[in-house]
Amino acid sequence: MQPAMNPTIEIGLSFILFLPWFAIIGALYWLFPRRPRHLRRRLFDLAVLAASVVLSIAGMRWGYAIADPNSGAIWKQVLATLVAYGIFLAVLTVAVPLRHWWWMRR
C-alpha cells in the first residue's frame, strides 16, 4: 500500500507542474511589445502577472475542491490544472488590449 501524498503538495501539484509554462507565457507578456518600457509599464505588467498567479492558484484550489471524488485523483489534478491555466490566460488576454489602450491614450 502506498502512503498518501501530503495534501498541501497534492493540491499545489497542478500549479507546480504548469509553472514552467506559466513562466514562459508570463515572460512573453512581460517582454512584448518592447516599447514603451517605463516604470508605469513595468508596474502595470508586474501587477497583472501577480494577479494572474494569485487568481490561478485560487482557481486551481477551487477546481481541485469541486472535482468529483469518484472520478479519481488524477482527474482532480486535471481539472485543477485546466482551471488554473484558463484563469491565467484570461487575465493576460484582458490585460493585453487594456495595456495597449492605456498606453495609446497617453
Image (cartoon, grey):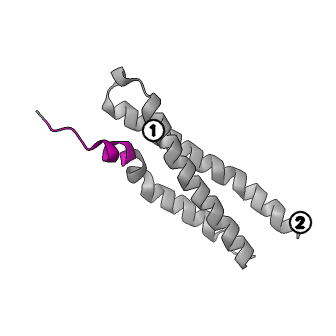
Q: Position of residue 73 (x, y in %)?
A: 32, 32
Q: Position of residue 96 (x, y in %)?
A: 71, 57
Please indicate whether residue 6 sits to the left or right of residue 24 in the image: left
Vertical placement of residue 37 versus 9, above or below? below
Please indicate whether residue 21 sits to the left or right of residue 73 in the image: right
Q: Position of residue 82 (x, y in %)?
A: 49, 39
Is 20 magenta? The answer is: no
The residue to which callout 1 is attached is 80
Q: Which mark is residue 60?
A: none
Q: Nearer the viewer, residue 15 or 26?
A: 15
User: Which residue shows up at 79% across the image and 62% down it?
Assistant: 100
Say which amino acid is labelled 1: Ala
Please indicate whether residue 16 sits to the left or right of residue 42 in the image: left
Residue 87 occupies which quadrant of the picture? top right
Q: The magenta stretch spans which residues?
A: 2-13
The residue to which callout 2 is attached is 105
Is 7 magenta? The answer is: yes
Residue 33 seen in render: no
Say which amino acid is labelled 2: Arg
